Every structure is written in structure tokens, then in C-alpha cells.
Amino acid sequence: MNKRRKYILAILYIASLLCIGFIILKTVSRSKLDTQIRIFSNEKNSLESRMAALWKIAQYTDMEVTDTLVRAVQDSNPYVRIEATKLVKRRREYRAIPHLIRNLNDNTQILHQPTGTSLPMVKIVSYNALKHITGNDFGPVESQDPVEVAETLHRWELWWNANAARFGMKPSEITPDYETLITHSALSEQQRIKYFRLALQKGYPGLPDIVITLLQKEKPDSGLMFLALCSASQYKMKETVPLIISLLEKELKVKQTTQAAARINEVLVQMTGRNYGPFYRGIPAEEQNDILSRWKAFQPKG
């Protein structure tokens, strides 16, 4: 009985030593990880030291490692973004997916050593990582056609919104290049109107630039011009008033009063609070020219 008891005590003693040793090793390992995370997180450190720290961090399996790598994919330095993307690809870090999709818009040119040419390497490695992690391919990102690239990003956005819950995540706001999709004439007007409405719904920050481009390029009676005028009025884009007055003048030079001219005039009234008279079918030329002259002489405040 005493022998059995001694045997059990010996086993417990050895087990306790192993546990203590494991705790010590874990503590030391954790301390080393924390040190590397601090080195990497400090953007004042040299690129070489931050990259070395990132490689060491990737050797651990703690949850904080994933958090650090996901943050690194969004780092301000493109070389860090590239290396972090390669690491999340190797580890199949699905939590990086929305950030990788955003990086498909990253056109930072980096010298590609094997070819000696500058390439948008962040975009390229992000594209490869997304294919590897998800098994999907929604089109090219290196095409010379900006519309094709913008549509690829939009397809990734739609896929992520539909599948984020499958990864235990919430859909993230991923903004495609709406400016290209809306202003490029390679797409049909119906497609461009669809993207315009999406940009309006999402409060796209580049909306004023899009409206200005449409006011300069689109036909006065087109659906896109109608949306541009409505947006300029709704969002009080006073910087567009001179453009809209110029648009009215061009429309009246081409033909006598039209529905488009009447609409443009109404928008100007709504935006400025000035009313120099309505355009209507059969309006005398003198009256029409007088209204146009008053608009041309109008100087918007601010």
C-alpha cells in the first residue's frame, strides 16, 4: 500500500513539475510575443525591424496574432501590407477577407524585382490571397479597363455581404470604385444608373465629383443627367450652380425650350432661391433669353 501511495505521489509530483514548466514556457513565450507585437505596432521603428517582428509574430497561434496580422493588412506602409497579406494567405485567415477586398482598390506602385517593373503589388497579392482563402475568382484586377476592375470589386462586395455570416462575421462596408462605374461610358446607362443609386444609398464620399463629371459630360435629357441634377439640388451642391447655368445655356442653343431646359431651370430655382420665371412650351424667345441672361449674371454666394 505504501509503495502504491509513493508511486502516486511521484506521478503527481512529476505532473506538477511539468505543469509548472509549461506555465513558465507559456509565460516566456507570451512575453516574447508581446515584445514583438510592440515592436511591430510602433510605426516609428524601422521597416526592417517591423518586418522582422511581423515574421516572428506569425509563428505563434494566439488569437492576438490573428488580430495583429489583420491590422497589418491595413498598415500605412505598402511593404507591410504586402508581407502581411502573404502571411494571412498562408494561414488562411478568413477574418482578413473584407480588408483584402478593400485592398483590391490599392494601386500603389511597387518595384517588382524579378521583372524590374513597377506593379500594383498590394492589389495583386490581395487578389491571390482572396482566391486562396475563399476558392473564388470574380474577375481580373490588373485589367487596363478600369470598369472591368471596378466591377470585379463590386462582385467581391456582393459575395462578402452574402457570405460574411458563414464565417461568423458581419457584412463590412466595402466601397467599390463607384466613380469609375458611374462616369465611364463603356457601361450601359441602365447599369450606370444602378450604380449611381447604390452610391446615393451608401452616402459615397466621392458623390460631388461624380455629379460634376455627369453635368459636364451627359446629355441634358438623359436619365443620368436627371439623377445628377436631383442630387445637386437635394444635397445643396452650390459649387455646381455655374455648371448647371452653363448646361442650360447649351441646351437652349441647340433647340428652343425643352423639358430638359425646364427641369434645369427648376433645379436652379430650388438651389438658389432665385426665380427669374418659368420655361414653358411656346415661351417667346425674348422672355427666354431674358431669363437666361439673368441666370448668367447670377453670382452664387459662398
Image (spheres, rainbow, N blue to C red):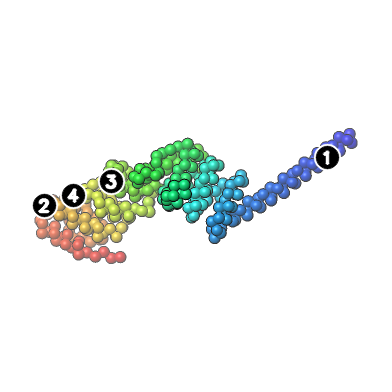
Kind of residue at badge 4:
Gln
Q: Which residue is mark 4?
A: 259
Quarter where residue 205 is shown: bottom left
The residue under the point 32% across, 55% down is: 209
Residue behind mark 3: 185
Q: Earlier in the sequence, mark 1 or mark 3?
A: 1
| N-term mark: 3 or 4 | 3
* Residue 234 figure quarter: bottom left
Q: Residues within 10 Å of mark 3 (few under 14, many from 20)?
A: few
Sequence order check, earlier mark of 4 and 1? 1
Judge from the rendering whether residue 11 lies leftward or rightward of residue 147; answer left or right: right
Q: Hey, what amino acid is under mark 2?
A: Gly
Q: Which mark is residue 264?
A: none
Q: Is residue 247 above or below residue 135?
A: below
Q: Give the residue type at disc 1.
A: Ala
Across the whole image, how many numbered discs are drawn on residues?
4
Identify the residue at image location x=20%, y=50%: 260
The answer to whether the residues at label 1 and label 2 have Cβ atoms under 8 Å apart is: no
Q: Secondary structure at mark 2?
A: loop
| Residue 124 position by quadrant | top left
**Pair 3/2: label in front:** 3
Q: CA distance from mark 1 to mark 3?
A: 82 Å
Percent position of residue 40, x then y = 57, 54
Label disc, if present, on residue 10 of the rendered structure: 1
Disc 3 to disc 4, how far (Cα)? Answer: 24 Å
Residue of label 2: 282
